[in-house]
Image (tube, rainbow, N blue to C red):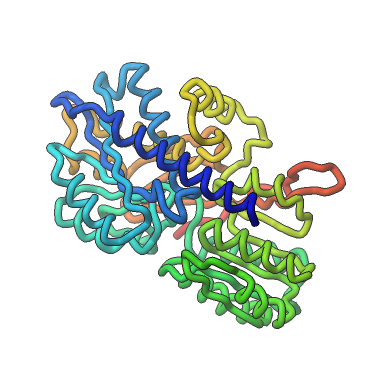
Amino acid sequence: MGNNGENVMQKSILSSLAVCALLVAVPAQAADEYAVGLSGAITGPVAGTYAPAVEALRLYIDKVNAAGGVNGHPIHLIVQDDQGQPSMGATNAKKLLGQDNLLLLLNTSLSSTYAPMIAESQRAGVPLLFAASVCPKEVYPPAQPTLFCTTAFASQFDSRATLAFVKEKSGTSINLGLAAMSIPLSRGEIDYAEGLAGEMGMKAVDKEIVPPAAPDYTPFATKLQQASPDWVYSWAPWVTEVKTLEALRKLGWEGNYIGWGHIETEGELARLKDGKFYAIGANALFSDRLPVQQDITATATAANSTYAANLMTEGWIAGMVVEAALKQAGWPATPEKVLAAMSHLKVDTKGLRGGPLEWTADNHFRTRQYYRVYRWNPASNGIEVVKDWTAYEVH
């Protein structure tokens, strides 16, 4: 417990340093720049999931600007910390949307911040992009016109792919435990998974809803263990997923556990070395050693980044999309031009996903979602692909 406390403190300090760098290093906006605003959970209990994405986005945009910008103009990224709190998200949205000529607003935070930010962005007529924050239902067909999402994880599709994998491994005559964080989308997704499991013939034996700042996961793990699940599925911020698993293992539970593969997955699989812990996700892990991953690593190293490169995929993809949307919008740009560009956009993810990220007028999630399953293989002492890319059409 002492080491865990020190690690939490170190992460908190690093997150604070990162947010200071993000907020202080922003120069005054010039008339010839593309203005983009972001509110994210850079500090607070879930910063480990969101802050690296913000850092990656900043590094990507710095790289674009160093190469001459977009259409000959730099991108001015304005970052505000909301700590995952709805009230701060609302305040940040108003502040950012009050900037002159803001073209695009990004949310990189918990789903509890969505409602106020959506309301403010719609009032201002500025498109809102969810980047590293879970895709809300409003981006699926028929999409709300001003909302878009680049994030790998997505409600309902993720549970369909997860339970399909569980079925492949163990059939449907199983007991299934479920765990969520008590925030709107996490809880809603686990409720959906509970219903879907029943339709598939699985028995959902227990469902635990964990507060974001829970100091001890033992009570929740105890209830899950007492229900004797064969599998436990958690779709939540990483802290809930991994702490539920660790609490179950301390209690002696030896079943299979599957969670959504957030950006922490790679390092955590290696730390835990648990052969029955599966991570399903839509991002390639850096164990794949792709050229784009080597580029991210080199960029992060050159910038002396606070965060490891393998935490940066979500932010990097968001950067790709921001660059592509602004390029297509042309110069001078307006929120209306950016919105039109985003409504017909196709971005090559260079292998970071199973395929391109493509938006249409009524689909602001993507036309096709790809899933892959990883785990730690104790025999080879390394991460392995358990199930390769599987595509789901999004209609």
User: Which of the pair 304/181 is nearer the observer?
Assistant: 304
On the rendered structure, is 291 left or right of 84? right
On the rendered structure, is 370 left or right of 116? right
Q: Is residue 88 visible from the viewing direction of this image? A: yes
The residue depicted at 46 percent of the width and 71 percent of the height is 182
Q: Is residue 75 above or below residue 118?
A: above
On the rendered structure, is 170 left or right of 183? right
User: Which of the pair 170/42 is nearer the observer?
Assistant: 42
The residue depicted at 53 percent of the width and 69 percent of the height is 180
Q: Residue furthest right?
A: 379
Q: Residue furthest front?
A: 2
The percent position of residue 391, horizontal first and vertical second, equals 59, 52
User: Which of the pair 304/187 is nearer the observer?
Assistant: 304
Q: Is residue 202 above or below residue 382?
A: below
Quadrant assignment for the C terminus = bottom left
The percent position of residue 161, horizontal first and vertical second, equals 61, 61
The residue depicted at 16 percent of the width and 29 percent of the height is 332
Residue 225, quarter of the rendered image: bottom right
